[in-house]
């Protein structure tokens, strides 16, 4: 029996411990990016849709609560109570715009605290997830399809890393965890 893969590259999905490390590291990257930004940097456009760095942080903070729900998608498949397909009311762009707008008056420090609090809950959810869930095939609300471990890595680690780079204007390459 061959090891499950994450995509066509033949790479194996990350193990839960690797996911936890990736969550901790990418969380630290967000906090470090926030610490290095000046008041002007927070207002600078940093993302293709015109968001400034503060709005990118609001997006990161707003979506962090959703990552434990990705684990719930796999539970629904396992239990026969769902299709394993995530969705957002109105689609991703509309959802993201609503969530960022809801945080328009929240100071940067409040957004960082929201992110930290929810990242901690995400890590707890990964640690508590039943081992058999990580191989169940799901589709995230953003359209990422694969075993839970792969989808979780892409949406909760790489997506957040990408946005930390957006805030600072840096775009170094990153890849899956080392085996």
Image: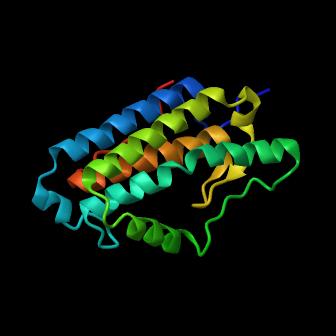
For image coordinates 58% across by 35% down, the residue present is 11
x and y percent of residue 25 in the render? 38, 32
Q: How many marks?
A: 0
For image coordinates 61% across by 66% down, the residue present is 88
x and y percent of residue 163 in the render? 35, 53
**Vertical order, 34 against 132 (above or below):** below
**Vertical order, 74 against 38 (above or below):** above
What is the residue that sits farthest to the right in this orientation?
Answer: 80
**Vertical order, 31 against 86 (above or below):** above
For image coordinates 61% across by 37% down, the residue present is 10
For image coordinates 12% across by 57% down, the residue present is 39
The image quarter containing residue 75 is top right
**Vertical order, 107 against 32 (above or below):** below
The image quarter containing residue 134 is top right
Query: Is residue 14 toward the left or the right of residue 163 in the image?
Result: right
x and y percent of residue 61 in the render? 41, 52
Is residue 104 visible in the rendered structure shown here? yes
x and y percent of residue 6 in the render? 62, 41
Who is closer to the viewer here, 50 or 6? 50
Is residue 171 visible in the rendered structure shown here? no
């Amino acid at each position: 029996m061959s090891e499950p893969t994450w995509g066509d590259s033949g790479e194996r999905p990350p193990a839960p411990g690797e996911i936890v490390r990736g969550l901790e590291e990418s969380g630290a990257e967000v906090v470090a990016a926030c610490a290095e930004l000046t008041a002007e940097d927070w207002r600078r456009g940093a993302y293709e849709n015109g968001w400034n760095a503060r709005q990118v942080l609001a997006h990161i903070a707003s979506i962090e609560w959703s990552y434990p729900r990705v684990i719930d998608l796999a539970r629904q498949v396992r239990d026969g109570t769902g299709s394993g397909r995530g969705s957002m009311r109105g689609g991703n762009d509309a959802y993201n715009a609503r969530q960022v707008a809801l945080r328009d008056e929240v100071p940067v420090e409040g957004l960082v605290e929201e992110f930290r609090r929810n990242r901690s809950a995400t890590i707890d959810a990964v640690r508590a997830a039943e081992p058999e869930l990580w191989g169940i095939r799901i589709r995230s609300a953003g359209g990422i399809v694969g075993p839970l471990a792969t989808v979780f890595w892409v949406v909760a680690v790489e997506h957040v890393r990408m946005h930390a780079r957006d805030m600072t204007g840096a775009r170094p390459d990153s890849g899956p965890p080392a085996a």
